Image (tube, rainbow, N blue to C red):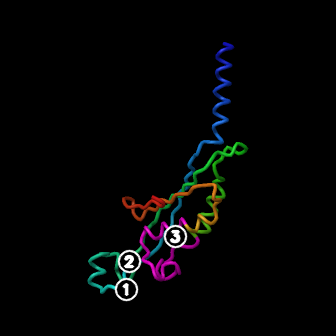
Amino acid sequence: MIKKLINYFKIKSIRSNHLKFMKVALTRKAHFNAAHRLHNPKWDEKKNKAVFGPCSNPNFHGHNYELEVTVIGEVDPDTGFVFDSSKLKKLIKEEVEDRFDHKNLNLDTPYFENKNPTTENLSILIYELLRVRIEKSFDIKIRLYETPRIFVDYPA
């Protein structure tokens, strides 16, 4: 019995010491709706239609985007958290949902004045917006679903 207790406390001690070296990923999901048009102004309508299909509709079209933001870091021994999930929720609301929800990405987002608002470019923008608000000691990853079957990971 004493050997079992000694072994238990050795394992518990080893596990708690490893917490400060182990990276853990926390992911939060979010949702927003936005319209866009995929279009290259250097091309004629025929080429835009051939490359972008119905996504080049001059009257725009919308998506119900699903977003996953992952923060990767070491577990804080005082809180047991990698990152405060309430803080992450607030950052996503301020930087993503408030900025893009029910907006036209082409018309309402200065970033897309000279850039095609593809899911790839949108995921890069979301990363950049959150990267400046999340401490550099954390890695972050963005997964953005344009449809249930098409999504982008950034960084890849």
Closest to the camera, between mark 3 and mark 2, is 3
Residue at 63%, 33% (x, y): give it: 15
Amino acid type indicated by mark 3 = Leu
| Position in image of residue 134 (x %, y %) | 63, 61
Rendered location of residue 61, percent (x, y):
39, 76
**Which disc is residue 41 wearing?**
1
- Indicate the secondary structure of the residue bearing disc 3: helix
69 horizontally vs 15: left or right: left
Quarter of the image holding residue 53?
Answer: bottom left
Disc 2: which residue: 38
Q: CA distance from mark 1 to mark 2?
A: 10 Å
Q: Quick check: 113 above or below 28?
A: below
Please report contact status of discs 1 and 2: CB closer than 8 Å, yes or no.
Answer: no
Report helix, strand or loop for mark 2. loop
Real-space CA distance between mark 3 and mark 2, rounded to the nearest whole angstrom: 16 Å
Residue interval drawn in magenta = 98-127
Indicate whether residue 84 is drawn in magenta. Answer: no
- What amino acid is found at the position of numbered circle 1 in the picture? Pro
